[in-house]
Image (tube, helix red, strand yellow):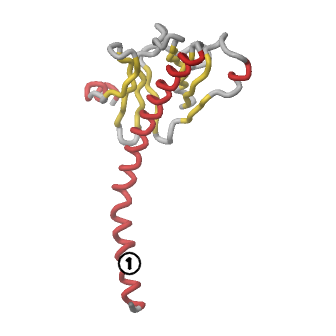
């Protein structure tokens, strides 16, 4: 292989990468939304499992202003040592929460509570929508009374039009 051939191959690779970069960036932004919704769903399942195994109410808290969410033992239950180790996540860049109704407490958090029998507390959120602001796409993690758990739902066009 000569030096000229090597330079030609490198130039060709540079052109291909330049043309594919915008497509790949959109792919990864859409993937971030899906992965964040899956992580939220996994956290609700983990919270339900922990509530049952510990026999203590567990709450998934969501702070839309700080773009964080996590899991902790509900206030007034559990030992002090367990309260020092909460699970907490930050939303990925470009994503935000949208909550239905006026559901925030004094600290600016919304809650999903799982009781020790595995059921969902009455004060829990019905739905949380995770928005990708750049692509204008959303995924909902919503309560499904049929199965007694939260599920990922497809986002509806009607909701998207009302947000624009």
Pick the residue in front: 31 or 58.
58
Residue at (31% x, 29% y) in the render: 155
Pick the residue in front: 3 or 132.
3
Pick the residue in front: 102 or 12.
12
Residue at (61% x, 22% y) in the render: 72
The outermost residue toward the left is 157
Task: Give the number of marks.
Answer: 1
- Looking at the image, is 129 positioned above or below residue 2? above
Few, some or many residues within 10 Å of mark 1 (<14, 14–19, 20+): few
Determine which quarter of the picture holds residue 152: top left
Question: Which quadrant is home to the N terminus?
Answer: bottom left
Determine which quarter of the picture holds residue 130: top left
- Residue 71, given in percent of the width and then of the height, sits at 57, 24
Q: Is residue 70 left or right of residue 31?
A: right
Residue at (43% x, 39% y) in the render: 35
The outermost residue toward the top is 122
Where is mark 1, residue-wise?
Answer: 11
Determine which quarter of the picture holds residue 132: top left
- Residue 157, given in percent of the width and then of the height, sits at 26, 29
Helix or strand or loop: what does disc 1 sit on? helix
The outermost residue toward the right is 80
The outermost residue toward the bottom is 2
Residue at (50% x, 20% y) in the render: 48
- Residue 58, given in percent of the width and then of the height, sits at 57, 17
Q: Is residue 99 left or right of residue 76?
A: left
Question: Which quadrant is home to the C terminus?
Answer: top left
- Looking at the image, is 151 positioned above or below residue 13? above
């Amino acid at each position: 292989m000569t030096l000229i051939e090597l330079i030609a191959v490198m130039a060709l690779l540079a052109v291909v990468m330049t043309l594919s970069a915008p497509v790949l960036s959109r792919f990864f932004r859409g993937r971030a939304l899906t992965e964040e919704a899956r992580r939220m769903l996994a956290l609700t399942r983990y919270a339900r499992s922990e509530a049952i195994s510990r026999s203590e109410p567990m709450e998934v808290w969501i702070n839309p202003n700080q773009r964080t969410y996590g899991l902790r033992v509900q206030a007034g239950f559990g030992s002090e040592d367990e309260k020092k180790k909460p699970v907490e996540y930050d939303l990925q860049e470009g994503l935000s929460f949208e909550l239905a109704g006026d559901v925030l407490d004094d600290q600016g958090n919304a809650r999903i509570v799982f009781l020790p029998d595995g059921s969902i507390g009455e004060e829990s959120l019905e739905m949380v929508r995770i928005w990708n602001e750049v692509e204008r796409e959303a995924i909902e993690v919503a309560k499904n009374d049929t199965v007694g758990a939260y599920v990922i739902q497809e986002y509806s066009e009607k909701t998207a039009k009302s947000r624009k």
